[in-house]
Image: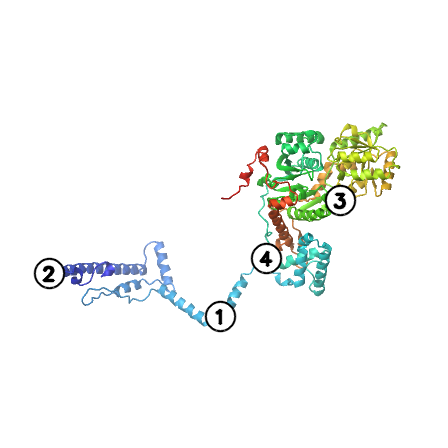
Amino acid sequence: MARFGVDTRPAAAASGGGGGGRGGGAGTGESALSFLSRSFREDLRLIRARAGELETFLNAPVPEPELLARLRRAYSSSASSARTRLDLSAIRKAFEAESWTGATGSTRWRWEEEAEEWEPVRMVKARLRELERRRQEQSPSDMLHKVKLSLKTMSFASEASEDVPPLDFGELFAYFLKQSVPLFDQLGIKRDACDKLVESLCSKRKDFLSASEPSSLRNDNVGDELDLRIASVLQSTGHNYEGGFWSERKAVISDKRHVAIVTTASLPWMTGTAVNPLFRAAYLAKSSKQTVTLVVPWLCKSDQELVYPNSMTFNSPEEQENYMRNWLEERVGFKTDFKISFYPGKFQKERRSIIPAGDTSQFIPSKEADIAILEEPEHLNWYHHGKRWTDKFNHVVGVVHTNYLEYIKREKNGAIQAFFVKHINNLVARAYCHKILRLSGATQDLPKSMICNVHGVNPKFLEVGERIAAERQSGQQSFSKGAYFLGKMVWAKGYRELIDLYAKHKSDLEGFNLDIYGNGEDSHEVQSAARKLNLNLNFHKGRDHADDSLHGYKVFINPSISDVLCTATAEALAMGKFVVCADHPSNDFFRSFPNCLTYKTSEDFVARVKEAMTRDPQPLTPEQRYDLSWEAATQRFMEHSELDKVLSSSSSNSDCSSSSMEQDGNTGRRMRKSASAPNISDVVDGGLAFAHYCLTGSELFRLCTGAVPGTRDYSKQHSLDLRLLPPQVQNPIYGW
């Protein structure tokens, strides 16, 4: 019996020998089988006996403890149900039904399973057969209908979804046009044309709706109405938009916020982008709501000699940081509490500006990447090849300092260059900032921008003004000198306009001398032009505007129309002087001051100069002094950049680019538009940023557009000065 490991073939086949061997083998095999048969039958008898004893035990009265009585009652109650009865007698019957049979010529054993099936198994088989029969009888359409009903019960649609009318083609097309405005801006298509087309499409939809089905929103702003209309339809479907196509996870916001101010220049270069961000960092750091880091460029010694006055150089970033802090604390009068960090920079002689070398954003640790203030965002990002600012930071504010288009138009082929620079500025402003502040209307109209003067004056100038006002009240003569002009001596800073005005009205201004203070690359040409025309202009070396030798002048003349917001004009007003300046958007902030005299024509210029020389300026009121201070400028910056809202927001709201909440006119529910509807504008911005990243990664493209060679990554000298990884380790080149 091969089933039990015993060979039951005839002995002759097994032994393969003669007759004597066959007889002995048969006797031994029969005795072995007989022994196994008796043993197996005895085991079966014991199993049947145990099964019977168990059945008798469970059915017998239970004089034993309460636990056994509960078991017996449970078994008795289950026996009444044919579905769950556990019939142990079936086991006994199965063993009794077994028989052992032999086959001729061999001994073969067979197990006969004639006992009835165990009840639970039988029920399962019957249930499966019933389901199979029903499936065959049921039509495919009935099955599909049941699947639909099941899916309908699992739907998470809003209860008010049936009350929201579906979108039509006109609304979808209008929304597409509205969200494609960033792309149209880059193509040069006027925004007014798109707005009119969107308004026309939305008006048709309003006319189509009946009076019983009012629009979901009743606003005068068609754009907001369309946004909420899209949001309400998407919300009625249960859709929830979680983020942009290009967006990434930003840094986790801690309890204390961090502000990083990144600028394009640093002291001792006395330029607006070096001085004003330094003051902004000092006054923002006075608040306990945030910590502040000022990030400025570090120049190698060869570039320092070209940029910093009097051939001043620094051997280390720590040495330059000490100089900056001492200069600042001497003027603000309090101990500054902010960090100064450096990024590699390279001076470009042709544009007379500093270009970042490498990815500037990498010099701000990720744990501190919360709020970024980009001073001159277009300048910082012209050749930026690194992480997108709006991806790394929760809130990015740009402050526009310079009218680059005005400077470029003065160069050779300036009109063509200005055309390309205008569109590049639009691209980088849209792709890298959440909010942009323009100091005046003289700057380029950039996306996401608004006009606000967020600069103040050095407190020392306000102190000078208070002292002069006190001297005048006591009867002393405060102004002993006439008129002067102060500024970097380059043609674009107003020297061309000044020489033209004096040359045209030379006879009208006979006997009127003007002192000019400044140094610059065009010093020789400016002085030569004035001497050739024999103008009454006296040239002096450049000085700090707070120098004591300049306090006695009564009139400050500034004919420049290339400035965005002239810091020297604000300082002169703070000292209580007259200011004669052009009627230009860059001077709009100063019009409210009575000592500011503006002119439109050259004849007006002569009249304003004579008026200022014949009378005394008015003392500043406390409100006027406050408007010029850095305290007021910081307050304006906090409000218009929405930084006050960002800093007061909870840490759970990590995306600081706030999305507006609107109220549905039908349901009264408040909906967040950005959480319901994907913003195509964000997708376009991300695509523009990606295209800009790809282009700035090409050294050929960088050189063709005027970048300093080798500024995609920082140099070896930068790595030594700033103790950075060598360039080949920071950006390894893989190859054979």
Q: Earlier in the sequence, mark 2 or mark 4?
A: 2
Q: Name the kind of residue labelled 3 in the image.
A: Ala
Pick whichever of labels 1 and 4 is earlier in the sequence.
Answer: 1
Numbered mark located on residue 194 in the image: none
Alpha carbon of mark 3 to alpha carbon of mark 4: how far? Answer: 44 Å
Q: Are marks 3 and 1 in contact (CB under 8 Å)?
A: no
Tag 1 or tag 2, which sits nearer the N-term?
2
Callout 1: helix, strand or loop?
A: helix
Q: How far separated are the C-alphas under marks 2 and 3?
A: 127 Å
Total numbered labels: 4
Count residues near mark 3 (Cα–Cα under 10 Å), then give few for <14, some for 14-19, many for 20+. Answer: many
Can you say whether 37 is above or below 706 in the image?
below
The residues bearing labels 3 and 1 have C-alpha atoms spaced at a distance of 73 Å
Q: Position of residue 661 (x, y in %)?
A: 66, 52
Q: SS class of the residue under badge 4?
A: loop
Which mark is drawn over residue 442?
Answer: 3
Tag 2: residue type? Gly
Residue designated by label 4: 239
Image point (61%, 59%), residue name: 236
- Residue at the far left: name it: 20
Disc 4 packing (10 Å; few <14; some 14–19; many ≥20): some
Q: Nearer the viewer, mark 3 or mark 4?
A: 3
Question: Which of the two discs, 2 and 3, labels the residue nearer the N terminus?
Answer: 2
Task: Using the image, tell me which numbered label, if any, was put on residue 20.
Answer: 2
The residue tagged 1 is: 140
Residue 468 sits in which quadrant? top right
> Which is in the foreground here, disc 2 or disc 1?
2
Q: Are marks 2 and 4 in contact (CB under 8 Å)?
A: no
**Residue 559 in sight in this render:** no
